[in-house]
Amino acid sequence: MLSLRAINQFYGQNHTLWDVDLDLMPGSCTAVLGQHGMGKTTLVNCIMGYLPVNSGTMTWQEKNAPPRDLNLQPSEQRAGMGIGYVPQARHIFSQMSVEDNLMIALKAARSNGPLAIPPMIFDLFPHLYDLRHQRGGDLSLDQQQQLALARALVLQPKLLILDEPTEGMSPWLEEDMGNLLRCLNHQYGMTILLLEQRISFIRRVADYFLLLHRGRNVATGRVAQLDEGMINKWLT
Ligand SMILES: Nc1ncnc2c1ncn2[C@@H]1O[C@H](COP(=O)(O)OP(=O)(O)OP(=O)(O)O)[C@@H](O)[C@H]1O
């Protein structure tokens, strides 16, 4: 679905990503791990087109369609292509209603075509239906997190990218988030890329991992292979 090869990125003179490779299989959930400042958000910003890639290739391929060079797609088109993103800072519009927050995502990506919130949104987030006329800023932090996720889902992305979705969450909300991601992954067949620090959460929801250290990809594999040795070496 998405293949990255030898991605390098610089902030000015600062070499931030070094020859990073990543392969996302359709319907899989992959976690990118690493301590603070190791390059996780930078990698996603490159995928979303918010930051330029200095070298390397990013190839997007859907079933029965030719591969597309993601570097050639303007960032504003990537959501329409099927890449949804929930940033770490939720960036919801606090003055707009819940419904308008959802509609604006549809309008931004679809200049023509139907502008209806898909039923799956309120199936997944029934509370948001009850709150649909409330201002985003009046929601609790958990509800804002749900709204940010719902807004990424209105376009029914093929790939959903989440930056630290469990940050600041209590254990029971973390469990709900895990169930939701598993549902999106297994029932809706969505491919998921997760930037995450909590190992227990990764073990619950992810199939594969990629470990970044100082912008370098130092380990990849199945989550079952993520052992204490790796955790002690790279994550503590
Ligand atoms: N706008 C920027 N300008 C210059 N350097 C930056 C900028 N954003 C991030 N960096 C640097 O790039 C490196 C990678 O940062 P990045 O935010 O991608 O790491 P991260 O793994 O996502 O960290 P965190 O877990 O704290 O979000 C860090 O050294 C950081 O200081």
Image (cartoon, helix red, strand yellow):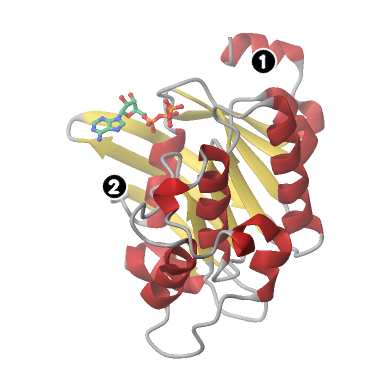
Whether residue 179 can be seen here: yes
Q: Quadrant of residue 234?
A: top right
Front position in the image: 66 or 98: 98
Judge whether 182 appears above or below 97 on screen: above
Foreground mark, 1 or 2, reads 1
**Residue at the image point whose x is 69% and y is 42% from the top:** 177
Q: Is residue 66 above or below residue 94?
A: below
Q: Amino acid at mark 2?
A: Asn
Q: Is mark 2 within 8 Å of ligand 1?
A: no
- Which percent across, then down, holds residue 74? 32, 68
Going by the picture, which residue comes out furthest to the bottom? 113
Nearest the eye: 42 or 121: 121
Residue at x-position 69% and y-position 69%: 120
Q: For the residue carrying disc 1, how many other residues have a C-alpha within 10 Å: few (<14), some (14-19), or many (20+)?
A: some
Helix, strand or loop status at disc 1: helix
Disc 1 to disc 2, C-alpha distance: 30 Å
Label ID, residue 231: 1
Q: Is residue 206 visible?
A: no
Would residue 69 be found to the left or right of residue 171 on screen?
left
The residue carrying mark 2 is 54
Give the residue drawn at x 41%, y 90%: 112
Q: Earlier in the sequence, mark 1 or mark 2?
A: 2
Q: Quadrant of residue 2?
A: bottom right
